[in-house]
Amino acid sequence: MDSSQEMQSPAAARQLREIWEYKTSDRLGPAWDAAFFDWIKRYGFPLVADALQLVAAPRFSEDGQRLPPNVRDVPRYAAVEGAEAAEPGMRDCYLVRGQMRKKFYSSDSDDEVLALLKDAMRAGVNAFEMYRAVDESDTLEDCFAALGIDRMEFRIAMGHPIVDLPVRHLVFIREDEPEWRLWDSYLRKTTGKGAQMNKRFGWYFPTRVPPVGGAPKRQSPSDI
């Protein structure tokens, strides 16, 4: 067995589990070998080993209390390091998303936020500008507007109403209705993205049918 095969073997998983136990005094037991083996197959031995070292390192709360390490953070760290290796700058996107969670919302189901941060990064926004936008903004939408993400793009990505009207003033249109397809076509022409759809297989629109005639002037983030 060559070295690469050895690193992908159950023995390698057991080795990482034992390293974790030695470093943290957290006795997991052999049952956890399967989890480590799955992480190795998913991310590779080097990334999982590096992630283990990061998670096992001492951490402290703001008031100085030592925080116990959580082995379930190992695959999360490995995913971040893997994303960084594939596209430099992604680590900052993950870290900024963590700051956004603390300030603006509380949810792990936020792939849309990460995708928008990736768009901002690819447009040239650096980590300092991202952190400053989080610090200086009162809402998540304002934060992304400060990063150059158009408010319409943000609302479509996040599944928010595309206009500032209470839901009771909007018209819910199902995806199987012809008016939904009209709105979908209209939005693709005017914004470059189609209509959203929620769990009820439809979306809220300001009117039953979209405006007719020429496409309206696109609004800048400050106008919306």
Image: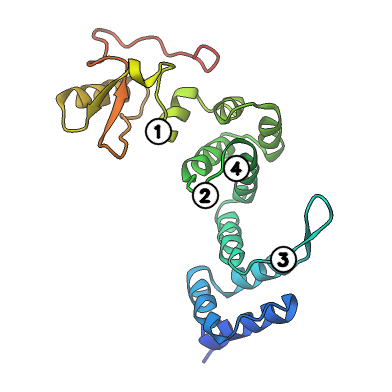
Q: Are marks 1 and 4 in contact (CB under 8 Å)?
A: no
Residue carrying label 3: 68
User: Neighbour class for label 2 at 10 Å: few (<14), some, many (≥20)?
Assistant: few
Specify which label sits upstream in the sequence, 2 or 1.
2
Specify which label sits upstream in the sequence, 1 or 3.
3
Question: Is label 1 or label 3 in front?
Answer: 3
Identity of the amino acid at label 1? Gly
Residue in front for this viewpoint, 77 or 44 = 77
Q: CA distance from mark 1 to mark 3?
A: 36 Å
Residue carrying label 4: 101
Instruction: Please tell me whether mark 4 sits on a helix, a strand or a loop.
Output: helix
Q: Are marks 3 and 4 in contact (CB under 8 Å)?
A: no
Identity of the amino acid at label 4? Arg
Please, which colouring scheme is shown?
rainbow
Question: Is label 3 or label 4 in front?
Answer: 3
Identity of the amino acid at label 2? Asp
Residue carrying label 2: 108
Query: Can residue 3 be spotted in the picture?
Result: no
User: Neighbour class for label 1 at 10 Å: few (<14), some, many (≥20)?
Assistant: some
Identity of the amino acid at label 3? Pro
Residue carrying label 1: 159
